[in-house]
Amino acid sequence: MPTNLPPEYFEVERRYKAASSPQEKISTLEELIATIPKHKGTDHLRADLRRKLSKLKDAAQASKKKGRQTSSFQIDREGAGRVALVGCPNVGKSSLLTNLTNAKPKVDQAPFTTWVPTPGMMLIENIQVQLIDTPPLSREYMEPELRELIRGADLMIILLDLQDYPIQQLEDSVEILKSHRIEVSCTENEPASDSSQDLHRPLIVVNKHDDWELDKEFGALCELYENECSFISMSTKTGRNVHQFKQAVYEALKIVRIYSKRPGKEPNLEAPFVMKKGGTVEEFAGQVHKDFLVKLKTARLWGSGAFDGQQVSRDYVLQDGDVVELVV
Ligand SMILES: Nc1nc2c(ncn2[C@@H]2O[C@H](COP(=O)(O)OP(=O)(O)O)[C@@H](O)[C@H]2O)c(=O)[nH]1
Ligand SMILES: [Mg+2]
């Protein structure tokens, strides 16, 4: 054993030894290797640990192939949209999930606390959205199932820590995602290209903006990226800007809420139908009941784009908050 190992080595080694799940073992071992200074005296140790790491990864792959149906990456879709929360260690992903949803993931000052994705439901006004806390981004490795989970989400949030080099974190996050073949573009006005379907436009959320004392830091960040991308900031600790955060998630999901109304009755404003922006009366009818889709004669509308009770055609594009009476 080389004698000149830094104190962090032993701290990480302790966590590595205590790790129980294979993912946890892999990540702590990666961390451990990173703590070792590179010189002749540590060559053997590093080679040794690398061999261990590759064995662990092989074993993890093999067991995943066996037990696919019980994988914790298979999460049922619930609610009006799925949002994957990604970012570097310690930015506050798990805190966000704990404070804004019904889920209870582990929150810890030690980095790399979250090993498997954890879903939770977040209420935005009268709809529920599924947020998924994910393991911290790591350059070395990403579970293939995690990649699919992130790619398949309706929205990706890249979370940054305002108090810990957010610029570096943003660059790292984008680079790491790209290295695992998750293409992201933070630029809002970039023209759509052929591959735009695979291009993710994340919502960039800056956490730990606890109070006004950090306004200057946040202002500087916004200024730096003024012509490139926009940020919203919040604090999961003090609850600052939580409302704005939820509104931004709603906007980014590009959905609308439509209320169904029966003739002569009031609509139930507690239980909207949720559709993608641009959805028509016809699509709405199909969502309410497939019989309506066939039998629909006309529809009457109460909402922003029409006068009360106006008759609209099947291809009328509905807007957020519209109330629709389907006539069959
Ligand atoms: N000051 C401050 N600390 C926070 C905030 N959100 C989370 N933290 C702390 O940051 C640390 C890491 O949080 P965690 O949610 O585990 O981060 P994760 O690794 O991204 O899941 C914990 O000590 C949290 O208490 C915040 O808004 N403000
Ligand atoms: Mg976490």
Image (tube, rainbow, N blue to C red):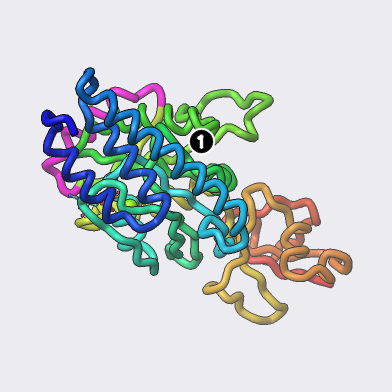
Q: Nearer the viewer, residue 254 or 301?
A: 254
Q: Nearer the viewer, residue 278 or 169?
A: 169
Q: In terms of secondary structure, what is the magenta stretch mainly? A: helix
Q: Quadrant of the C terminus?
A: bottom right
Residue at 49%, 60% in the rendered image: 129
Report x, y in % for residue 292. Answer: 82, 69
Question: In the figure, is residue 17 to the left or right of 210?
Answer: right
Q: Which residues are magenta?
A: 210-228
Tag 1's secondary structure? loop
Question: In the figure, is residue 26 to the left or right of 294?
Answer: left
- Does the image show residue 221? yes
Q: Nearer the viewer, residue 62 or 123?
A: 62
Q: Residues within 10 Å of mark 1 (few under 14, many from 20)?
A: some
Q: Is residue 252 above or below residue 323?
A: above
Residue at 41%, 50% in the rendered image: 23
Q: Is residue 10 above or below residue 125?
A: above
Q: Where does label 1 land, which residue?
A: 201
